[in-house]
Image (tube, rainbow, N blue to C red):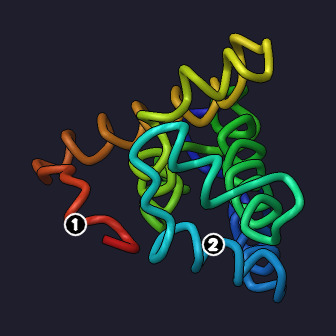
């Protein structure tokens, strides 16, 4: 990855911001960050059965941030520039990380949400470099 952000990085961040504001994704993000509180897979299955809108909202919001995370982990998007403008990715990871091992097992996909996990670590290191405590209470939706 380049050490300096480019105009393309800035353009991609603005495009991501635009996508975040599309109605269905915005609704899904808001639900995930404010109402989703499943503590385990039993609660997840109760709150997000496959035929419910909450199931679609969960996957819509999490897969969006997984996609953004893949841009960061692959070096397509300048991580520092991104984290200077957005930490919602970390908030999403904080909401779901305790479910991920079981979600991976259920999907028979050990790499499920791997980029999101790695990018959340990158975000923590970014915050640590600023001398900022990265507690879930200081993140969006908390």
Q: Is residue 18 above or below residue 103?
A: below
Looking at the image, which residue is at 52% across and 30% down? 117
Crowd tier of the residue under label 2, counting other residues whose Cα lies within 10 Å: few below 14, some 14–19, many 20 or above: many
Q: Is residue 55 above or below residue 25?
A: above
How far across and how far down the image is residue 57, in percent?
Answer: 75, 66
Looking at the image, which residue is at 58% across and 48% down? 44
Q: Is residue 51 above or below residue 126?
A: below
How far across and how far down the image is residue 70, in percent?
Answer: 73, 35
Residue 124, by quadrant, is top left
Query: Mark 2 — residue?
Result: 29
How far across and how far down the image is residue 51, in percent?
Answer: 89, 60
99 vs 107, left or right, is left
**Residue 114 or residue 100, whichever sits in front:** 100
**Residue 19 or residue 26, whichever sits in front:** 26
Residue with the most extreme right position:
51
User: Image quadrant for the N terminus?
Assistant: top right
How far across and how far down the image is residue 109, in percent?
Answer: 77, 14
82 vs 122, left or right, is right
Cα separation between marks 2 and 1: 17 Å
Asked if marks 2 and 1 touch (Cβ < 8 Å), the reply is no
Looking at the image, which residue is at 43% across and 60% down? 37
The local secondary structure at tag 2 comes to helix
Looking at the image, which residue is at 78% across and 75% down? 25
Query: Residue 80, can we see it?
Result: yes
User: Image quadrant for the C terminus?
Assistant: bottom left
Crowd tier of the residue under label 1, counting other residues whose Cα lies within 10 Å: few below 14, some 14–19, many 20 or above: few
Residue 103, by quadrant, is top right
The local secondary structure at tag 1 comes to helix
Query: Mark 1 — residue?
Result: 138
């Amino acid at each position: 990855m380049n050490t300096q952000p480019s105009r393309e990085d800035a353009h991609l961040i603005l495009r991501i911001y635009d996508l975040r504001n599309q109605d269905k994704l915005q609704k899904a993000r808001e639900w995930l960050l404010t109402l989703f509180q499943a503590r385990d897979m039993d609660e997840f299955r109760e709150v997000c059965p496959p035929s419910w809108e909450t199931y679609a909202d969960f996957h819509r919001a999490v897969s969006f941030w997984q996609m953004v995370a893949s841009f960061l982990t692959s070096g397509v998007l300048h991580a520092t520039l991104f984290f200077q403008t957005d930490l919602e990715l970390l908030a999403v990871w904080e909401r779901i990380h305790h479910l991920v091992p079981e979600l991976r097992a259920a999907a028979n996909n050990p790499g499920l949400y791997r980029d999101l996990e790695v990018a959340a670590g990158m975000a923590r290191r970014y915050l640590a470099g600023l001398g900022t405590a990265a507690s879930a209470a200081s993140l969006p939706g908390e």
